Amino acid sequence: MKHLPTAVLAAALAFPSAAFAQAAWDFPTPYPEGNFHEKNIAEFISDVNDKAGDAVKITLHPNQSLIPHAQIESSVRDGIVPIGELLVSRLENQSPIFGVDSVPFLATSYDEAWKLYQAQKPFMEEALKKEGLKLLFSVPWPPQGLYTKQKINDISDLSGKTFRAYNKSTEELASDAGMVPTQIEASDIPTAFSTGRVEVMMTSPSTGVDSKVWDFLQDYYELNAWLPRNMVIVNQSAFDALPASAQKVITDAAAAAEKRGWDASKEETRRTTELLKKNGIQVIQPSDKLKAEFKKIGEKMTEAWKQSAGEQGEKLLEAYKK
Ligand code: PCA
């Protein structure tokens, strides 16, 4: 140390532990800046940055600008970034526990989605803990409906069509309905439709508006089939390295963001359904036949999910139905 300039030496003595240096946290997310999830996260970040003093400063990187969606979880796990957002059900391949919010027609309203989340949460937290990850908060998308270019009376009208999928469940659903699924990120939807790669999708009115679907399709069927959620996760070691006061700022801000996010999601359902109509999309109630056919696929997928999730899945569903 004796060759170090005095100023550097003084700084080293004043900050003996790296834990108390300011942490600069990059926060990658998959969805566009104007989306309600990202606005909610931006508010979470300014809440933390305002209250955590010099302990931590978080910077938002939306819309896969820093890390692609498929790598956000592993990047947080490996400490490449300390915090990130992703669609919960993208981890379905690691454990079926993460996929329960995307089983069609299991939870179709906000009240049911909240109950399902409460039943799923302890299992999610346990699975995340094994990866060195901590759940901060989780917020649902508006209910999922069917977007098409032509009128659909029953499921046979979908047969052979190309389908944009965003997780394993949507892929299965499409195959069960006789369609041909391809995984496409939300940000790539407009290109995928306008170049003819896909012609049908199921997603929220929110992603419909983000994608300006009126540029390339006509109809939206309000199936209200499930409410998939996003989650914000943090690397446990990065979290533990912060002073206790900053940790509390983060968990308090997360609790507030979760509450705010659920309220915003409900409002987003109304707002974006109106915006679809205003921009010329026909918002249609599906025929009883179409609904019944999709419900039947949902029942089959619920059974398949139960099989794959075993004892944990049984316990989760028991807690949900209580
Ligand atoms: N939007 C995201 C996930 C669910 C949703 O409503 C998407 O379409 O990728």
Image (cartoon, rainbow, N blue to C red):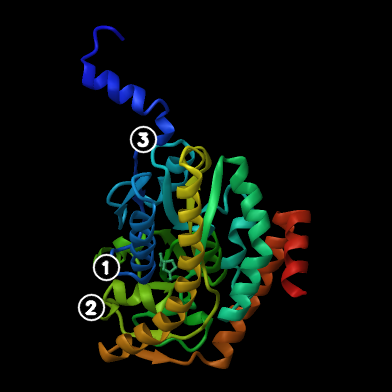
Residue 94 in picture, x, y percent from top left: 59, 47
Callout 1 touching callout 2 (CB < 8 Å): yes
Which quadrant of the picture is home to ligand 1? bottom left
Secondary element at image label 3: loop
Could you tell me which residue is drawn at 34 percent across and 39 percent down? Answer: 22
Give amino acid for label 2.
Asp
Secondary element at image label 2: helix
Residue 53 in picture, x, y percent from top left: 35, 50
Q: Closest to the observer: 245 or 268?
A: 245
- What quarter of the picture does the N terminus occupy? top left
**Disc 2 designates what residue?**
215
Q: Earlier in the sequence, mark 3 or mark 1?
A: 3
Residue 140 in picture, x, y percent from top left: 50, 70
Residue 29 in picture, x, y percent from top left: 36, 55
- Where is residue 100, by image quadrant? bottom right
Vertical side of 86 occupied by 176: above or below: below
Q: How many marks?
A: 3
**Disc 1 designates what residue?**
190
Give amino acid for label 1.
Pro
Disc 3 under 8 Å from ligand 1? The reply is no
**Disc 3 designates what residue?**
21
Callout 3 touching callout 1 (CB < 8 Å): no
Q: Closest to the observer: 24 or 37?
A: 24
